[in-house]
Every structure is written in C-alpha cells, then in structure tokens.
C-alpha cells in the first residue's frame, strides 16, 4: 500500500510540474504579445505575464522584459508548489515577438 501511495503522489507531482511549465510558457507568450502591440511597453508585458502566472498558482514569480528596435522578449521564472522538492519545482520560459510599428 505505501508503494502505491508513493506512485500516485509522484504522478500527481508530475502533473503539477507539467501544469507549471505550461503556465509559465503561456504567461511569457501573453506578456510578449502585450508588449509587442503598437503602443505596448516592455513593463506592461511583464505585468501581464506576472498576473497570468500568479493566477495559475505559481509562487516566487520573477519576470524580466527587454526590447530592441524590432522585438520584445519576456522571461518568466517561477516555483511550482509541490509536495517534495527534488529540484524540479523551478520552471521558466521566454517568448520573443516582433514589435508592431506604431
């Protein structure tokens, strides 16, 4: 019985980590899209990314955003709330989008 419980908890943790990876990826993409639109700014993209990551239940969220003349990049780093941290709780993703002309 204990082995079965450990296996079930391991599967649940894998699902939570997969959700966290998907959430940071979508948050970075949404932030980059927000910053890339005409009139958008890199800080507004970072704020959108942080809001999405927070609503997905991620912890210790850090966003960075940068822009050049032709593109904007948003990076999101966060921690996934899991039972046993064996080094897999940190997730991150970056998204780069071309800037729309204003």
Image (spheres, rainbow, N blue to C red):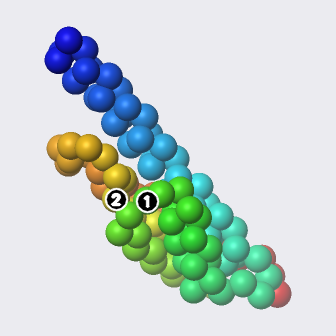
Residue extending furthest toward the front: 1
Residue at 66% x, 78% y: name it.
35
Residue at 32% x, 22% y: name it.
8
Q: Position of residue 88 (x, y in %)?
A: 26, 46
Residue 89 to residue 37: above or below: above
Q: Which quadrant does the C terminus fall into?
A: bottom right
Residue 76 to residue 102: above or below: above
| Lower position in the chain sequence, tag 2 or tag 1 | 1
Q: Secondary structure at mark 1?
A: loop
Q: Nearer the viewer, residue 74 or 52?
A: 52
CB atoms of marks 2 and 1 within 8 Å: yes
Q: Which quadrant does the N terminus fall into?
A: top left
Q: CA distance from mark 2 to mark 1?
A: 6 Å
Q: Position of residue 98 (x, y in %)?
A: 68, 70
Q: Is residue 73 visible?
A: no
Residue at 48% x, 43% y: name it.
19
Residue at 45% x, 77% y: name it.
64
Image disc number at residue 79: 2
Taking the image as shown, residue 69 lies to the left or right of residue 85, namely right
Q: Is residue 58 visible?
A: yes
Image disc number at residue 58: 1
Residue extending furthest toward the top: 1
Q: Position of residue 49 (x, y in %)?
A: 57, 69
Q: Position of residue 53 (x, y in %)?
A: 52, 63
Residue 60 figure quarter: bottom left
Q: How many marks?
A: 2
Q: Secondary structure at mark 2?
A: strand
Q: Residues within 10 Å of mark 1 (few under 14, many from 20)?
A: many
Q: Residues within 10 Å of mark 2 (few under 14, many from 20)?
A: many
Image disc number at residue 6: none
């Amino acid at each position: 019985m204990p082995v079965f419980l450990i296996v079930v908890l391991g599967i649940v943790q894998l699902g939570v980590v997969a959700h966290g990876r998907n959430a940071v990826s979508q948050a970075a993409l949404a932030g980059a899209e927000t910053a890339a639109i005409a009139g958008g700014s890199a800080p507004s993209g970072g704020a959108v990314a942080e809001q999405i990551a927070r609503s997905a239940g991620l912890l210790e969220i850090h966003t960075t955003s940068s822009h050049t003349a032709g593109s904007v990049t948003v990076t999101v780093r966060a921690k996934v709330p899991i039972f046993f941290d064996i080094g897999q709780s940190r997730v991150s993703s970056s998204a780069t989008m071309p800037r729309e002309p204003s």
